[in-house]
Image (spheres, grey):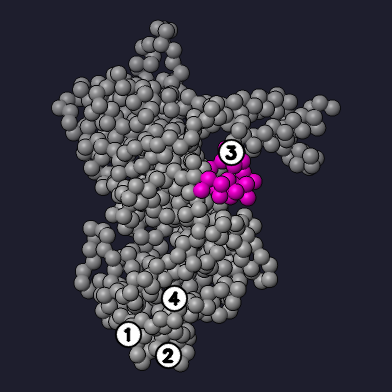
């Protein structure tokens, strides 16, 4: 061990007793049951639905309540109490309105505080007192600990405990105490949250999801393809920026850009008003109750066209300067016959529906107009100088990665590119070939380099971020080509089809999944691949548990845009010391409905895997970190106190 490091550490542990106490503490923690991991994926800006799943711990809160009070409370009372734990402030207001006098309300307070204390005690049973204390509301820590650790068989302090509760009520603090206990329970039922990609896109409030995650006690993120677009835009990629603006316009979510992140879209609107009119293919998709006026829809339609044309031009520039991306077939603006309004793809000619090529020079179709260049430069400047967006993107980088090995499992949003035989596909970048884990590592290297150097806008690293969005060998895209242009302008839907990487049917094969786990140095006998990105069509009988349980797909459709094809509103996964459970969710309509009716949005649980023996902290990533700490502390003991 480095003696300078040990000297620094000795400033914290300045006595033999402190070192010994910490070693004893850490070794004891290793023998506790592992904490519950909660996996969510493809949130797509659906903040309200995500909040509900987070508050109920995908059913863990209700399970704890049922375990404790099933013999004491009716089904309706269990629902009411669970709703109180999910939404304490709102539910307390509703309950208080139902009481005619203070005496009845005080009785309710007394019973509720007692039940909340019992629930906290049960939810924290596998944690240390130190960890529990950190979860408790600061202003009530002393009171809660007194009530938690009381002994019912000793009557000497019975009146003392009653007086504590009475004083809390009489001093008007009961609402705050109950709310604090409810939020502490939510923290304790889940030890760690995994977000397996796509916080952004489609839904209206990804910024609120980001704020929630920033303040969440323990979380990691595996970047999704849409997350990488936002990272790329902030890192200086103009084409990534054009993509996020186009998608926000397409799904009527430009408020995310303007209101949430403070980006001025007036330059884009001025350009759009000059060159574009109404166009059916570019009208926004309305999935919310907040329907824009006809004038607003027309403005969005025009901006949608303007930014799409800028995107297509910028894409062409990258394809030409990076020939090893092998995307020359996507130089679509060069394949258009502008006089005949036709395009030739793969040897077949198609008519173009209502083209909008006012800013295209047929002699040099990939060239941006001077006006377009100024618009995209202004937008890029605004994006990179948004304080709120900077905070969110830095958090994504700090907590994020393309894949994660955690407690023996592989977490990945998209895919591991493979060929038809299940072998890792190779991509050549600047005369060097990469495949499998090495390919994902080089992708992440470029993404982090681009983010660290935002002024470099046309370098390889920044171009590679865009490739992650749309490239054939991208682990986030997982298709042979993205047919955005065709969907806008060609009515023949055969041109819209995007061929998926063989991974998406080979992941049904257990041997392929075992090979992938081995590629990432994980035990194929014990590990699982936890995957998002592709909505599971439950309505058609698709099973999210694949390859004999080795593959678990947890994108079931948080996004309302997908729910008509999936038939559900998302999957989440729980992994506690006893094993894994997959939870399917019904559509979440509103918080108000839950408060009014006491209903939850869980439907079924499916057993994924059951541990033969209850897993301990010792067998987890956290356990590995604690063992390292113990080793260092033992080294400190030998260096300082055992000479």
Q: Residue at x 30, y 25 (%)?
A: 112
Q: Which residue is mark 3?
A: 525
> In the depicted view, which residue is nearer to us: 213 or 587?
587
Residue assigned mark 4: 311
Q: Give the labeled residue for mark 2.
A: 361
Of circles 2 and 3, the one toward us is 3
- Looking at the image, can residue 361 be seen? yes
Image quarter where the C terminus lies is top right
Which secondary structure, mark 1? helix
Vertical position of residue 191 compared to residue 167: above or below:
below
Q: Residue at x 44, y 43 (%)?
A: 545
Q: CA distance from mark 3 to mark 1?
A: 62 Å
| CA gap, disc 4 and disc 2 | 15 Å
Q: Mark 4 or mark 2: which comes first in sequence?
A: 4
As helix, strand or loop, the secondary structure at mark 2 comes to loop
Closer to the observer: label 3 or label 4?
Answer: 3
């Amino acid at each position: 061990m480095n003696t300078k490091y040990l000297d620094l550490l000795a400033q914290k542990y300045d006595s033999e007793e402190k070192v010994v106490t910490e070693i004893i503490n850490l070794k004891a923690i290793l023998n506790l049951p592992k904490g519950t991991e909660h996996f969510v994926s493809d949130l797509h800006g659906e903040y309200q639905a995500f909040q509900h799943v987070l508050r109920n711990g995908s059913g863990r809160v209700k399970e704890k309540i049922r375990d404790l009070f099933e013999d004491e409370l009716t089904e309706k009372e269990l629902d009411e109490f669970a709703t109180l734990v999910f939404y304490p402030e709102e539910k307390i207001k509703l309950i208080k309105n139902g009481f005619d006098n203070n005496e009845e309300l005080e009785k309710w307070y007394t019973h509720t505080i007692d039940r909340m204390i019992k629930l906290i005690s049960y939810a924290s049973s596998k944690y240390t007192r130190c960890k529990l204390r950190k979860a408790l509301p600061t202003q009530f820590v002393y009171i809660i600990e007194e009530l938690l650790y009381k002994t019912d068989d000793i009557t000497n302090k019975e009146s003392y405990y009653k007086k504590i509760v009475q004083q809390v009520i009489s001093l008007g603090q009961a609402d705050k105490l109950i709310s604090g206990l409810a939020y502490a329970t939510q923290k304790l039922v889940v030890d760690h949250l995994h977000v397996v990609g796509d916080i952004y896109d489609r839904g209206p409030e990804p910024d609120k999801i980001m704020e929630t995650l920033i303040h969440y006690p323990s979380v990691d993120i595996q970047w999704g393809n849409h997350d990488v677009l936002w990272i790329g835009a902030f890192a200086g990629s103009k084409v990534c920026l054009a993509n996020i603006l186009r998608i926000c316009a397409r799904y009527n979510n430009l408020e995310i850009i303007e209101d949430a992140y403070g980006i001025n879209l007036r330059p884009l609107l001025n350009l759009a008003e000059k060159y574009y009119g109404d166009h059916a293919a570019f009208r926004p998709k309305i999935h919310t109750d907040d329907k824009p006026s006809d004038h607003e829809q027309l403005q969005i339609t025009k901006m949608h066209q303007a930014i799409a044309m800028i995107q297509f031009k910028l894409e062409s520039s990258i394809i030409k300067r990076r020939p090893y991306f092998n995307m020359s077939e996507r130089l679509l603006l060069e394949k258009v016959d502008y006089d005949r309004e036709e395009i030739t793809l793969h040897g077949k000619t198609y008519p173009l529906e209502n083209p909008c090529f006012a800013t295209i020079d047929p002699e040099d179709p990939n060239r941006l107009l001077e006006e377009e260049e100024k618009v995209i430069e202004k937008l890029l400047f605004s994006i990179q100088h948004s304080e709120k967006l900077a905070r969110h993107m830095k958090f994504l980088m700090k907590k994020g990665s393309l894949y994660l090995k955690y407690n023996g499992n592989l977490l990945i949003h998209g895919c591991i590119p493979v060929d038809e035989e299940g072998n890792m596909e190779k991509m050549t970048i600047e005369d060097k070939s990469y495949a499998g884990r090495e390919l994902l590592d080089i992708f992440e290297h470029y993404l982090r380099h681009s983010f660290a150097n935002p002024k470099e806008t046309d370098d390889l690293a920044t171009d590679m971020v865009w490739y992650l969005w749309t490239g054939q060998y991208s682990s986030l895209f997982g298709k042979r080509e993205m047919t955005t242009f065709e969907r806008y302008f060609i009515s023949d839907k055969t041109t819209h089809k995007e061929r998926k990487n063989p991974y998406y049917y080979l992941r049904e094969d257990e041997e392929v999944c075992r090979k992938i786990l081995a590629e990432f140095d994980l035990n194929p006998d014990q590990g699982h691949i936890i995957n998002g990105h592709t909505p599971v069509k439950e309505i058609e009988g698709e099973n999210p548990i694949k390859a004999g349980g080795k593959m678990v797909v947890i994108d079931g459709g948080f996004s309302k845009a997908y729910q008509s094809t999936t038939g559900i509103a998302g999957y989440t996964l729980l992994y506690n010391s006893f094993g894994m459970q997959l939870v399917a969710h019904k559509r979440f309509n509103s918080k108000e409905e839950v408060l009014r009716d006491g209903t939850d949005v869980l439907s079924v649980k499916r057993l994924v895997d059951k541990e033969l023996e209850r897993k301990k902290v010792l067998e987890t990533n956290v356990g590995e970190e604690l063992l390292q700490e113990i080793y260092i502390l033992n080294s400190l003991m030998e260096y300082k106190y055992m000479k």
